Amino acid sequence: MSEMASSAAPPFPTATEKLKFYGLWAAAVIALLLLPRIFPSGGSLTTFSLIGISIVFSLSYNILLGQTGMLSFGHAVYYGLGGFLVIHAINIIGANKLPIPLPVVPLIGGLTGLLFAVLLGWVSTQRSGTAFAMISLGVAELIASSALILRSFFGGEAGISANRTKVFRIFDWSFGPQIQIYYLVAAWTLIAVIAMYALTRTPLGRMCNAVRDNPERVQFVGYDPHVVRYLAFCFSGFFAGIAGALAAINFEIANSAYLGAVQSGTVLFATYIGGVGFFIGPIVGAIFVTILSLGLSDLTQVWQLYFGLIFIAVVVFAPGGITGLLMMHRPLLRAGTLARVLPSYLIALVPTSAMIIGLIVAIETIVHFTVHAGDDSHIKAFGVPFDAANRYVWAMAAILLVGGFLVARKTWARVAHAWDDATSGARAKGIAA
Amino acid sequence: MSTAIELRGIEKNFAMTSVIRNVNLAVAQGERHALIGPNGAGKSTLFNLISGYMLPTSGSILLRDEVVSGLPPYQINRRGLSRSFQVTNVFANMSVWENLRCAVLWAAGHRYSFWKNIDNLPEIRERTARILEDINLTGRRDVPAGLLTYAEQRALEIGITVAGGADVILLDEPTAGMSHAETERAVALIRRLTEGRTLLIVEHDMSVVFGLADRISVLVYGQIIASGTPEEIRGNQKVKEAYLGEEAA
Ligand SMILES: Nc1ncnc2c1ncn2[C@@H]1O[C@H](COP(=O)(O)OP(=O)(O)OP(=O)(O)O)[C@@H](O)[C@H]1O
Ligand SMILES: [Mg+2]
């Protein structure tokens, strides 16, 4: 009987599957070690560090949103408090010459995040859905406004700073140079990613998914959904605290922006754009959003507006995020029918790009006349100079926008057609798509 | 024989309407007990009260001589009572395998543990696989529950209910909407899975009821009008008038 029953269970991973799995992690480690050799400039090391911080923060957010189905508008609270505590900790360690090296300091941030999640989470996790979202927003406002009131701890508008090189040293690392910070962030990112991945494979991690899907039924298989949500919240706070700590170490400063609504919004944004339904979704989102925000802010003044547009586009057209979009193509790739959709993508790309360019020119022109009406009308957006007062430019923008849209609509229909064809082709080969 | 479930003077009002009226019922340990009655009689409401999903307006409910009314559903479940739902209530985005595994975890003692790899728990694997075979969904193991056919979802519903090994099982119209062949298979399954356990089942199909039940209670307008062996119920004049009608009897 038991022999028979086991055969009904999913097969154990084969040696090749295991090799693939561990190979992926090993490849990640190698990539982390190679990155600073390929891109050794200070700027790229800073970018990598910011990406690592964002990955940890976004993954911690997805413990709530993707894994347990809780939409938080105040996740930066745990990130920010972790960051502030770490700045204070660095100052105390430096002043008292405590034998605590910098690499273990992020743990202080994690424990701070955990502590506040333990304290603030019990009530808010009573319910998920709207009630949880609203309470998270309220708590975030509360903490953010106290940050401006409790000046001695939060340092008011200016924030508080620390000197990370004054901390007890090991291996003669001062942690002054960005490359050393890069390695610190990379190591902690790797540890946090592995830990959060492992969490999804535990009984608690699975019950988080069950609570996300159907909290009512969970009660009838012995679990209290409130406790499941609370534990998820605590883990999420812990890892958010680690992310905040890494940010504080990187910048050597913590200020009220760490705890603020923008920070909470950004992590929601990155996680959602990456895709909440997949473990790697938030990683993809963190990389995408960090690079985009660094890049866009150089190219245009209203980069946040473009962020908003991208976010809306993802919510409407790709609720599975970037990862969801990519994963949709996996069955086609396996069935060998991917080639049936790719040409239609290329065709759609042309008018769609035209439409987007028209939109950008229109936005930049409007911004010029509403925000900088008195300035010189020769402006530069995305590195391209043009005259915002020139009617030909207006006409061109209108033609690109409207004409692009009209043509693009036809090509999108073609994409949909090709997609149906490719998926039914995959299904014919017995691959579910 | 000791009682598995006992209801004492149970009343349930929704706003001003009284749906359950002074229900007294005892289900003996190891008994298969059917609860029948017309639509809207309050059968599902009674299940909701027993399983802790709703609070009775008055009266008390005992599970193996222990008062459980007032406890939340998960506490009652941990004391060994498990129920299914009339309207399928599964984890729609999770695979059949994950659905069943979640239903096994607490009873197997893993609780909220976050330090164990769930794929490295042989007894969980074993129990989940056994239930999967029992409900005949081996071929659908990796399919999200939301994509199963109706009959498959009903089978999964039963599977989730019995997976934890509770010894008091409440099934709310498990065969509703199934074809004749599917019903027969489901009944055989229920018979096998509830061997040696206590079963309280709501069922509209009289051939199922009379074939499966040791005792039957008839609920009409929130009141139990008769309770007895299948023969007693078949011959009961009140039951004939209120529910069964002449042709079924
Ligand atoms: N949550 C509720 N609020 C108000 N009224 C309710 C609620 N739940 C059930 N009722 C009412 O209580 C009565 C009994 O409903 P119940 O679902 O228990 O009947 P049932 O015997 O299970 O019927 P069926 O055979 O159709 O499943 C019905 O009149 C129903 O409308
Ligand atoms: Mg009912």
Image (spheres, coloured by chain):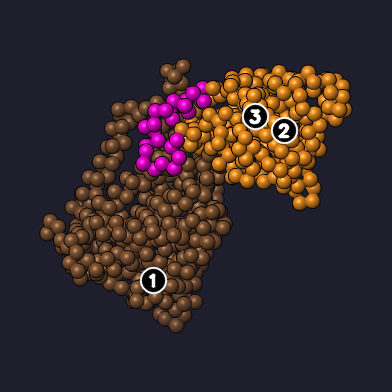
Chain that is brown in the image:
A
Kind of residue sitting beneath label 3: Thr
Chain that is orange in the image:
B
Of A126 and A209, the residue lying toward us: A126
Q: Which residue is mark 2?
A: B25
Whether residue B153 is visible: no
Is B120 covered by the magenta stretch?
A: yes
Determine contact: label 2, label 3, CB under 8 Å.
Answer: no
Q: Identify the residue at horizontal 30%, vertical 29% (top origin).
A: A16
| Region in magenta | B109-133
Q: Does residue A98 lie above or below A335 as drawn?
A: below
Q: Is residue B36 left or right of residue B99?
A: right
Q: Identify the residue at horizontal 42%, vertical 53% (top origin).
A: A234
Q: Identify the residue at horizontal 74%, vertical 25% (top origin).
A: B216
Q: Is residue B121 left or right of residue B141?
A: left
CA gap between label 1 and label 3 equals 62 Å
Q: Chain of mark 3?
A: B
Number of residues whose C-alpha sits closer than 10 Å to that of mark 3, classed few (under 14), some (14–19) or many (20 or more) = some
Q: Which residue is mark 3?
A: B3
Q: Quadrant of the C terminus of chain B?
A: top right
Determine contact: label 1, label 3, CB under 8 Å.
Answer: no
Q: Is residue A253 left or right of residue A410?
A: left
Q: Nearer the viewer, mark 1 or mark 2?
A: 2
Q: Which residue is mark 1?
A: A256
Is A240 covered by the magenta stretch?
A: no
